[in-house]
Amino acid sequence: MSSYSDYALQQHFVRHQRWGFRWALWTAVLWGAWYIPGTALWYEYPYNSISADNQGQRLVATAVMTWIHALAVFIFLALWNGSLGKLKDYGRTLVRFRKISKWYALASLFGGPMAIFGSYMAMGFVGPVFAAVTSLFYPVVGAVIARLWYQEKISGQAALGMAIIIMGGVVIYGPGIFGELGDDSSYVWLGYLGGILSAIGWGAEGAVASRAMDVTDPDVGIQCRFSFEILFWGLLVLPAVMLLTEQPVWFLIKETLMTPIAMTWMLLASVCHAFCYTAFYKSFSLIGVSRGEAIGNLYGVFAVIFVALVTLELPEWYFLVGLALTIIGSFVMFREPAEAVAQLRSVTETPGS
């Protein structure tokens, strides 16, 4: 009887791990696809009318992009949860701010104003391949925060994978740091800053949101997270920019919504991100933050493939080397037995603690 119970428990762990890996792989595919419409948006009106030397207006344009993007993602998530009959669960979760949704509110700050905003910066000031590859070390950030905050275990194998990913990040950033970008790229540092923000933001978001996932549905949780992002941009950041500066915030919003081609790219980017994030959050509840993020890191491969297919150009050699290192590190991180993945935390805490 005992051996049968052990076998059943082991099979349960295997199923959880298998489904967690599947969701994380869908994350990678859809995330990689997002960089195509996300970059194309910069080449459409009103964004292509902004001078490359006008840093302030380009940053405001990035904020407008991120807010409209969040609105569109929320709509797609509402349709998804509506089809699953989970809208009531969404409402109940959202109003329980003190115990649960406060973690999704904090996750939205890392995921929106840092990660998505930073990635749009990287796409606009450098390019889609750089934006995709430079975020690849976000699993290191997530794993370290999860370890320090709520003691999610990091094995020796996972630590080795993290070290390889960091090496990949050094290769990616090295040429820019040592001046290989050229003299005509005086504002490209904003793209590099955006890449760093996206890596830190997505890593921190996973660790923070995971605090509430033990007691909430991932589909509901991701809609809560985008609800708070919409409020953050729409009620705080963009109104403050309009009051304190002369930047054309309302003009950019209106022209984006009224330009069919721009909105087509925006909707394509948003539908990719909506279901990418849904799969992302589902993987966390099954295989943990560090493993889910490590497998999701394969998005870099898909992004490079999609960009190469669209542009018919291969990226710079150091992007490919950095990409290879980060993907190898990701595989090293998640090659652990199912039982080990099932026992990630050394302590049990409630989300409100």
Image (spheres, rainbow, N blue to C red):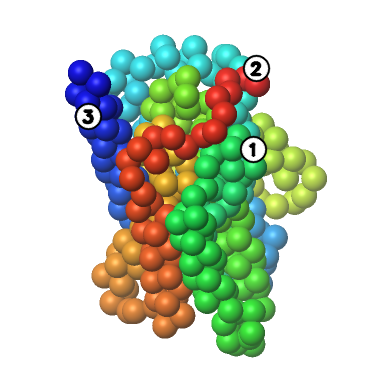
Return the residue nearer the eye: 28 or 114.
28
The residue at 26%/40% (across/down) is 18
Residue positioned 58% across, 20% down in the render: 350
Which type of secondary structure does the marked residue at label 3 adopt? helix
Q: Identify the residue under disc 3.
A: 7
Instruction: Mark yes or no: residue 299 visible.
Output: no
Which residue has dot 2 on it? 98
**Marks 3 and 1, how far apart at CA:** 33 Å
Q: Is residue 97 left or right of residue 291?
A: right
Q: Do labels 2 and 1 touch, CB within 8 Å?
A: no
Q: Earlier in the sequence, mark 3 or mark 1?
A: 3
Q: Residue furthest right?
A: 244
Amino acid type at circle 2 is Arg
Name the residue: 34% across, 79% down.
Answer: 314
**Residue closest to the eye, 206 or 66:** 206
Q: State how far apart marks 2 and 3 are (Cα).
A: 40 Å
Label 1 sits on what residue type? Trp
- Image quadrant containing the N terminus: top left
Which residue bears the numbered disc 1? 149
Q: Amino acid at mark 3?
A: Tyr
Residue 336: x and y, percent?
36, 49
Q: Nearer the viewer, mark 2 or mark 1?
A: 1
Residue 179, position in %: x, y? 63, 85
Q: Is residue 272 above or below residue 40?
A: above
Q: Nearer the viewer, residue 256 or 265?
A: 265
Q: Is residue 49 left or right of residue 177?
A: left
Q: Position of residue 324 (x, y in %)?
A: 39, 71
Farthest front residue in view: 2
Q: If you read the primary sequence from the N terminus, does the residue marked by circle 2 or circle 1 appear first?
A: 2
